């Protein structure tokens, strides 16, 4: 099921790209909360116990003011900083897990998808509207699939103030019955608006809603793939566990600020965690993420920086009935820059059976799910606009050690379902008993490490019928500046497991200013084959390494 809004209502301009990188005040990601550190964990823990008992976290930190008398807190305000958040998460991890609940008014219970879409936040009620900050917030009501109440607070100069949900914040359409003016409501998330595509319209460019899901778009793009705070037991027989954000603290930015800071408290049966997101919108939307995990038990199958996307069909693999659209996908490939400096490209597929692939590494430099094809003619969908879906690139900060990038491909027959997941899985998981902190940078837009590197990139993978029954013709198109630096064509090097290859050729492709590699794949009676292809010039690999898992449709 998709989480969050599917479209961006703004006008779309051509996508401009730049290198991934935040232009932030390097004194620290925190601004408003930097002067209000609070470490009295016993008071925080007591507040958490009260919050769990009441089913939410509004007012959890109500006792903080007694320990921070140097701060002039007005009624309803409490000191807040990242240290406060970490103390809350640590205390929460020591308490038995209890999922928050909320009794919605009758008109908002058991809503259908269309009914839920008939609840709209009133733009005139937007947080910070008219203050000239360049940022506004709009909130989502609880209801439909979003049955976990989410507490939202604003942070200004180190002091947090909760936002209370009320019916007057929302416009209820004809599909919704009467909602009393005094009805008790709850939030399920929020979205961030700003002048992204022009100076006169406040575009929506980030949304946090549904479990620990969030989405971001860069200038000129529409929502596509999602990210999550954490993935636990993905594709495991015992079933997946979905951690959720139960509370947010959003720092009020200064006028003209280049970024906005969002803090989040994550919770689940297995772990509590403190997250800080620093979001800088633009041609590429850059996001710095810092997460501190407090496991309740050993996290043996945990995914760090998980990305969730959709691949239904395309020229690399199409096992479904004919579609008037040549391709349908939010992402078309997994890109990896490993510790050895190899740029890897794995085309995505929609397999007949569940497929899990692992790319072993020690100190990964980056990975992401990429949408490279930007030509409308290759999608022909006037509503979905798949050619404008973002790429998301993860760049670890520090050494993440041993582990592997795991790719999960799930069979799907409809594009409404996310069937692709990719994340970093640390070797040995994350043990209980002590906090575990890591940081990474996310780039939402049109950027992967290969975009800026001097390597030839894979443009397109095509698989079709081969010259003999039971064989397949495979075409891989490459493009890049490295291909024009020699009068001779590079040498394609190919290896395979579970199949044989033949008729390997390479030729110039004037249409892409690159080269095209072609070969015949013969899997025999096998149902699975692994392929590896790279371009070699003067005994040096000058391209992304193309990795492909063929499965029988």
Image (cartoon, rainbow, N blue to C red):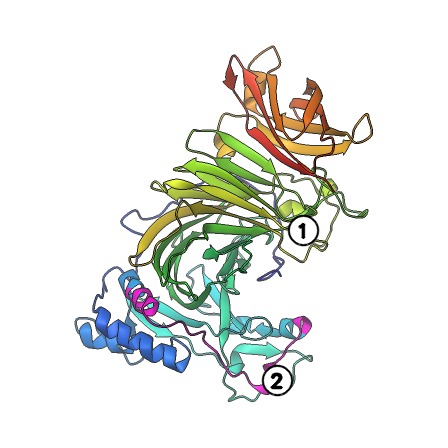
Q: Position of residue 392 (x, y in %)?
A: 52, 46
Quarter of the figure that contains the C terminus: top right
Quarter of the figure that contains the N terminus: bottom right
Q: Earlier in the sequence, mark 1 or mark 2?
A: 2
Q: Write down the residue under mark 2.
A: 107
Q: How crowded is mark 2: few (under 14 residues within 10 Å), some or many (20 or more)?
A: some
Decide which of 130, 106 is in the foreground and name it: 106
Q: What stretch is highlighted in magenta?
A: 87-114
Secondary structure, mark 2, is helix
Q: Write down the residue under mark 1.
A: 411
Q: Residue at the location (63% across, 32% down)?
A: 459
Residue 217 on the magenta span:
no
Left or right relative to 551: residue 534? left
Task: Tell which residue pokes out farthest to the left in this image.
Answer: 70
Q: Can residue 482 be seen in this view?
A: yes
Secondary structure, mark 1, is loop
Q: Residue at the location (60% across, 81% down)?
A: 109
Q: Position of residue 283 (x, y in %)?
A: 51, 45
Is residue 154 positioned above or below 105 on the image? above
Decide which of 307, 77 is in the foreground and name it: 307
């Amino acid at each position: 099921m998709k989480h969050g809004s599917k479209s961006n209502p703004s006008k779309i301009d051509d996508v401009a790209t730049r290198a991934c990188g935040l232009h932030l005040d390097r004194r620290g990601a925190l601004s408003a909360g930097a002067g209000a550190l609070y470490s009295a964990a016993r008071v925080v823990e007591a507040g958490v116990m009260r919050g769990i008992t009441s089913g939410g976290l509004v007012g959890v930190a109500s006792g903080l003011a007694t320990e921070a008398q140097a701060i002039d807190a007005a009624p309803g305000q409490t000191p807040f900083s990242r240290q406060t958040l970490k103390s809350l998460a640590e205390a929460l991890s020591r308490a038995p897990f209890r999922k928050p609940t909320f009794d919605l008014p009758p008109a908002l219970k058991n809503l259908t998808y269309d009914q839920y879409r008939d609840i709209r936040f009133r733009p005139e009620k937007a947080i910070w509207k008219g203050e000239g900050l360049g940022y506004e917030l709009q909130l989502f009501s609880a209801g439909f699939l979003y049955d976990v109440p989410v507490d939202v607070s604003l942070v200004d100069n180190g002091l947090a103030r909760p936002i209370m949900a009320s019916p007057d914040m929302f416009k209820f359409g004809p599909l919704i019955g009467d909602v009393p003016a005094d009805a008790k409501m709850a939030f399920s998330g929020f979205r961030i608006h700003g002048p992204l595509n022009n100076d006169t319209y406040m575009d929506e460019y980030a949304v946090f809603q549904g479990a620990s899901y969030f989405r971001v778009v860069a200038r000129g793009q529409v929502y596509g793939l999602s990210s999550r705070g954490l993935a636990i037991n993905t594709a495991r027989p015992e079933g997946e566990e979905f951690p959720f954000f139960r509370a947010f603290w959003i720092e009020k930015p200064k006028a003209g600020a280049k970024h906005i800071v969002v803090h989040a408290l994550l919770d689940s049966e297995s772990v509590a965690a403190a997250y800080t997101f620093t979001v800088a919108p633009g041609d590429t939307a850059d996001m710095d993420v810092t997460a501190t995990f407090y496991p309740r038990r050993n996290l043996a199958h945990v995914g760090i920086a998980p990305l969730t996307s959709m691949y239904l069909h395309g020229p690399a693999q199409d096992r479904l009935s004919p579609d008037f659209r040549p391709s349908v996908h939010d992402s078309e490939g997994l890109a990896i820059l490993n510790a050895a400096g190899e740029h890897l490209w794995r085309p995505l597929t929609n397999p007949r059976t569940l497929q899990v692939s692992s790319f072993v590494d020690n100190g990964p430099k980056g990975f992401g799910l990429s949408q490279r094809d930007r030509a409308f003619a290759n999608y022909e969908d006037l509503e979905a606009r798949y050619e404008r879906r973002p790429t998301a690139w993860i760049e670890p900060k520090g050494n993440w050690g041993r582990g592997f990038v795991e790719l999960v491909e799930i069979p799907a027959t409809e594009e409404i379902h996310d069937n692709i997941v990719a994340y970093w899985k640390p070797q040995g998981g994350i043990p209980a008993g002590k906090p575990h902190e890591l940081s990474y940078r996310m780039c939402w837009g049109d950027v992967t490490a290969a975009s800026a590197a001097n390597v030839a990139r894979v443009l397109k993978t095509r698989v079709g019928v081969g010259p003999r029954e039971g064989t397949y013709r495979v075409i891989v198109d490459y493009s890049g500046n490295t291909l024009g630096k020699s009068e001779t064509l590079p040498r394609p090097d190919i290896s395979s497991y579970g199949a044989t290859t033949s008729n390997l050729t390479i030729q110039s492709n004037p249409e892409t200013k690159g080269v095209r590699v072609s070969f015949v794949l013969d899997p025999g009676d096998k149902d699975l084959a692994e392929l590896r292809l790279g371009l070699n010039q003067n005994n040096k690999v000058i391209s992304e390494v193309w990795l492909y898992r063929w499965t029988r449709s």
